[in-house]
Image (tube, rainbow, N blue to C red):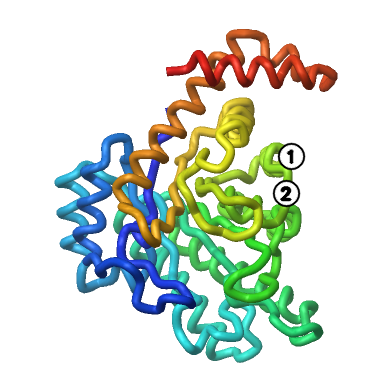
Amino acid sequence: MNKISMGIWGNTNLRDRFNINGFGEDVPVIDRIKQVGETEGIDGIELHLPTEINDANADEIARVLDEYNLQIVQLCGHTWTEKQYKFGALANSEDKIRSNAIDRVKAALDMGARFSVPISVLWPATDGNDFPMQTDYLSLYERYLDSVRRILEYLHQNDYSTKICLEPKPFEPRSYIMMGTTGQALCIVNEIDDPNFGINLDIGHSLIARENIEDQLSLIARYGKLYHTHFDDNDMQADIDLPPGTISFERLVSIIYILDEIAYDGWFGLDLFPYRDDPAEYMKLSVENLRLAQQVVGLMNSKGARQLRHSGAHGPEMSRLLRDCIREAK
């Protein structure tokens, strides 16, 4: 059964542009990790360098990980939280800023190697545009791909086993983020053509792009490039990062079904933003919904779902089967 990890950026005081102070209190990194460790069903954490892990606190984090039997599953460099990255990071038009971003990713890989971290995500975030014709996308892609190649060269030179994952998102924080859809990101991954470079599909990002996630997962799997997942839920309008399955449990089942079908054996990462609610409840509900969805998938397969799906001609029958298995699952 797939293990579950939690991004510790989500269980602290969260701010938005309408309330820059947030509704809660800032929680120290160590306490956030402990809270994850105290949540039944979660075995890993995800975090950023240098804002959540760095040379100053790495030893203490290692002790807490051992204490709670947790693993760092994903560690990436923060390349969108500083003024220098306001107009881009790995695709920035200024060589110095772009080099700084590359060095940040390399530093995250170095730290990741210390903890045997399997995944490091690249999220373009500020690489994109807000105004029409603001950005030269031809040059943007040239610079971004050059940065990725330099990062992968560093990874191989150091014999790191980390998989680097491109995470698409159509908008926010920029009006348009480059490679904003799954197909665009997969196109770049396939152009780079490196066994350590693949996709992290964030469910919420795919939803606000109005994508059919069954289709996108199947397409990524066709090329063997699904290396990580981020689970959350939203109304397909804004990336509100609710626990998976809270807006549409049927949709969560469909996602888990495809992951089961392609024998995805990676982690289920949680990317949650409980602005007003108890983060512990978000985590518990996420674990419950993910495990319940897996039970529903098992029931569906035992009752002939694969045979029904083969022809693509049994919509009402599949709908009834899905409904009945949800009712039956415990």
Residue 3 in which image quadrant: top left
Q: Residue at x 75, y 87 (%)?
A: 134
Residue 264 in which image quadrant: top right
In the rendered image of this protein, does residue 87 appear above or below residue 222?
Answer: below
Q: Residue furthest top?
A: 303
The quarter of the rendered structure image containing the C terminus is top left
In the rendered image of this protein, does residue 313 appear above or below residue 178?
Answer: above
Q: Residue at x 37, y 59 (%)?
A: 276
Q: Which mark lies nearer to you, 1 or 2?
A: 2
The quarter of the rendered structure image containing the N terminus is top left
Residue 247 placement (x, y as % from top left) = 56, 43
Count all numbered tags in the image, as a single digit. 2
Residue 301 placement (x, y as % from top left) = 61, 14
Which residue lies under the disc numbered 1? 215
Question: Which amino acid is tagged 1?
Answer: Asp
Asked if residue 116 can be seen in this view, the reply is: no
Q: Residue at x 56, y 83 (%)?
A: 98
Residue 253 placement (x, y as % from top left) = 58, 30
In the rendered image of this protein, does residue 285 appear above or below residue 117?
Answer: above
Q: Nearer the viewer, residue 292 or 54?
A: 292
Residue 144 placement (x, y as % from top left) = 66, 73
On screen, residue 233 versus residue 258, left or right, reads: left
Q: Nearer the viewer, residue 162 or 77?
A: 77
Characterize the local packing of mark 2: few (<14), some (14-19) or many (20 or more) Cα atoms within 10 angstroms.
some
Residue 156, which numbered label?
none
On screen, residue 89 versus residue 189, left or right, reads: left
On screen, residue 81 versus residue 258, left or right, reads: left
Which residue lies under the disc numbered 2? 211
Asked if residue 191 can be seen in this view, the reply is: yes
Question: Which amino acid is tagged 2?
Answer: Glu
Characterize the local packing of mark 1: few (<14), some (14-19) or many (20 or more) Cα atoms within 10 angstroms.
few
Q: Are marks 1 and 2 in contact (CB under 8 Å)?
A: yes
